[in-house]
Image (cartoon, grey):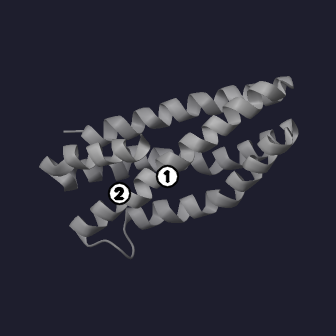
Amino acid sequence: MTVISDFMQQDHVDIDAIAERATAAAAAGDATTMVREGAEFLKRLQRHIDQEEQLLFPAFEERTGMREGGPSVQMKMEHDDMRPILEQMHAAVAAKDAAGYQKASKALFDILVPHNQKEEQMMYPMLDDTMGADAGALLADVKALGA
């Protein structure tokens, strides 16, 4: 069963599409669209990170005992690496700074692309396997946090 994997991977796809619209708007000098799509991207990405850090990763760590050196620890470290860049992106959106947004977006995606691949190829399948029959209930909690 791939309950968690399917949902979280689709969220990656949806978030990436918003990011593409924001970056394209920044490149075109369309500040209005960049602000709207950039703010939506940042909101959705933060929600996704919160779902992982508040629900998915703790559930995985509880089930496996991997609290110190497992894959969820690495994912959280990468989230930490993203935070200063996300702050730069928030500042660029607030200032309607297209060049600043593009620069920060590139830096973010240099981290985010391999990060998402690791989640999709390793972390989420491990979550599905580890949670077993409880995956559906955990996913319901994830969806509720995102509502």
Question: At x 30% / y 48%, what residue is drawn?
Answer: 141
Residue 32, visible in the rendered structure: yes
Q: Which residue carries the number 2 mark?
A: 55
- Amino acid type assigned to the residue bearing label 1 in the image: Ile
**Of 108 and 56, which appears nearest the observer?**
56
In the image, is 105 to the left or to the right of 65?
A: right
**Which of pointers 1 and 2 lies earlier in the amino acid sequence?**
1
What SS does tag 1 mark?
A: helix
Location of residue 28 in the rendering, given as x and y in whole percent from the top left corner: 84, 23
Question: At x 61% / y 30%, what residue is drawn?
Answer: 18
What SS does tag 2 mark?
A: helix
In the image, is 92 to the left or to the right of 63?
A: right
Point out the image quarter for the C terminus: top left
Q: How far apart are marks 1 and 2 (CA)?
A: 10 Å
Residue extending furthest toward the left: 133
Question: At x 72% / y 55%, what residue is drawn?
Answer: 87
In the image, is 121 to the left or to the right of 105?
A: left
* On screen, residue 28 above or below 69: above
Location of residue 50 in the rendering, given as x and y in whole percent from the top left corner: 47, 54
Point out the image quarter for the N terminus: top left
Q: Which residue carries the number 1 mark?
A: 49
Question: At x 39% / y 73%, what residue is drawn?
Answer: 69
* On screen, residue 3 above or below 25: below
Disc 1 crowd rating (10 Å Cα; few below 14, some 14-19, many 20+) is some
- Amino acid type assigned to the residue bearing label 2 in the image: Leu
